[in-house]
Image (cartoon, rainbow, N blue to C red):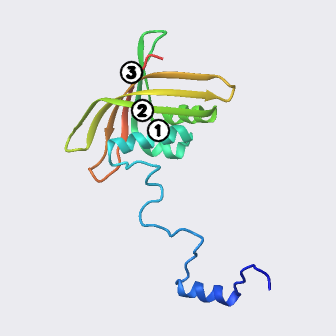
Amino acid sequence: MSDQLYISPLAVIVFSFLCGGCNPFAPAIGDGDPFEDLFGDPKTIEGYFTNFRHAYELRDLSLYEPLIDSSFVFIYTDFDTGIEREWGFGQELESTRRLFESTVDVQLQWKQIITRQEYNEGRRAVAVRSFNLAVALNTGDVFRGDGNVNFLLARADTTRAWRLLRWRDESEL
């Protein structure tokens, strides 16, 4: 007889039965959300920013859209004219879709929160936060920018996820 270990098929079946159907080669499924470490708690402001970053970096509109309220407004300064401009929910989703489709990599790094204020019994919040952004386009060009976002977040009650109501771009790209 050789030095190799022989395990009979019957022993494997008995072992499986005694383990209650467990698979010794696969980890047990734990309680809770398996993506808990990947995604933030959308009921916290920090969790909201985590989810925003992941939606951008994964370039996934299905992750981004739930973060935006249907009455959303984006406000930015047109530096060529010096005029403040804005767009709404539909334009935001379309411009973000085009951004995601034209990039091969997006890296968004949130920096310190400059201002954070919750009001209206925890149903509204203003958060001004600095960021660094690097966008690599399909053409090979890479754009880098930094600045501040000024977010007005809202939710129906404190058990619900935050949604972006207004985004005032305070960057100087």
Task: Choose mark 1 or mark 3, whichever is in front.
Answer: 1
**What is the distance, in whole Å, between disc 1 and disc 2 at their CAs?**
8 Å
Task: Choose mark 2 or mark 3, whichever is in front.
Answer: 2
Residue 29 appears in the rendering: yes
The residue to which callout 3 is attached is 170
Task: Choose mark 1 or mark 2, whichever is in front.
Answer: 2
Q: Residue at x 70, y 87 (%)?
A: 9
Q: Which mark is residue 53?
A: 1
Label 1 element class: helix
Q: Is residue 35 above or below residue 32?
A: above
> How far across and how far down the image is residue 69, in percent?
39, 41
**What is the distance, in whole Å, between disc 1 and disc 3 at their CAs?**
18 Å
Q: Which mark is residue 110?
A: 2
- Three-letter residue code for mark 3: Glu
- Would you say the residues marked 1 and 2 are in contact, meaning their CB atoms lie under 8 Å apart? yes
Label 2 element class: strand
